[in-house]
Image (spheres, rainbow, N blue to C red):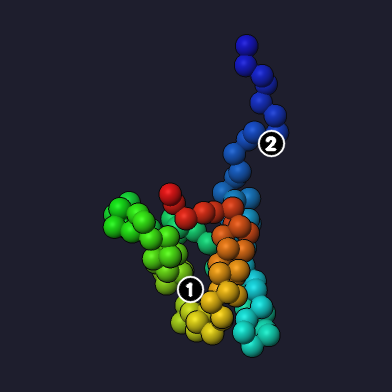
């Protein structure tokens, strides 16, 4: 007999799920707090064709997502970061949402 469902087993309601999609904040190269939208390969429109064409290039997939989600000001702020800081920000951005680049 299957174990009874626990409260944590239920799916999130749409409003609850949307509440988790808060913008991500980081400190920009200018020392000011910057925001990025919720990291979502789905919202960025990433397709199976993108995965196929870039299956060995996670950086390209990351840029596809960034360029689809971020506006011009957000892109400019990311462009101003050092390579090391950019890596930290993008890693933390993904971790904050629980999303990963598709494998």
- Which of the two discs, 1 and 2, sits closer to the camera? 1
Tell which residue pokes out farthest to the right in this image: 7
Compared across the picture, whether 10 is left or right of 59 comes to right
Q: Quadrant of residue 31?
A: bottom right
Which callout, 1 or 2, points at the residue further toward the start of the chain?
Answer: 2
Residue 88 showing in the rendered view? yes
Residue at x 53% of width, y 62% of height: 39
Q: Give the label on residue 81, or none.
A: none
Verify CB contact (< 8 Å) between mark 1 and mark 2: no
Residue at x 67% of width, y 84% of height: 32
**From the viewer's perspective, is residue 52 above or below residue 59?**
above
Compared across the picture, whether 73 is left or right of 7 comes to left
Residue bearing mark 1 = 70
In front of the other: 88 or 33: 88
Q: Secondary structure at mark 1?
A: loop
Image coordinates for residue 95, horizontal then vertical, percent: 61, 57
Q: Secondary structure at mark 2?
A: helix
Tell which residue pokes out farthest to the bottom in this image: 30
Image coordinates for residue 47, horizontal then vertical, percent: 34, 55
Compared across the picture, whether 91 is left or right of 68 comes to right
Q: Quadrant of residue 33?
A: bottom right
Residue 47 showing in the rendered view? no
Tell which residue pokes out farthest to the top in this image: 1
Residue bearing mark 2 = 8
Quarter of the rendering occupied by the N terminus: top right
Q: Disc 1 and disc 2: Cα gap in Å?
A: 33 Å
Residue at x 57% of width, y 49% of height: 14
In front of the other: 82 or 74: 82
């Amino acid at each position: 007999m299957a174990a009874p469902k626990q409260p944590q087993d239920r799916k999130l309601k749409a409003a609850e799920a949307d509440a988790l999609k808060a913008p991500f904040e980081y400190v920009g190269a200018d020392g000011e707090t910057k925001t990025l939208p919720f990291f979502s390969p789905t919202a960025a429109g990433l397709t199976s064709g993108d995965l196929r064409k870039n299956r060995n290039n996670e950086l390209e997939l990351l840029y596809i997502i960034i360029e689809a989600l971020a506006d011009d000001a957000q892109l400019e702020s990311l462009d101003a970061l050092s390579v090391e800081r950019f890596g930290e920000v993008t890693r933390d951005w993904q971790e904050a949402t629980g999303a990963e680049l598709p494998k």
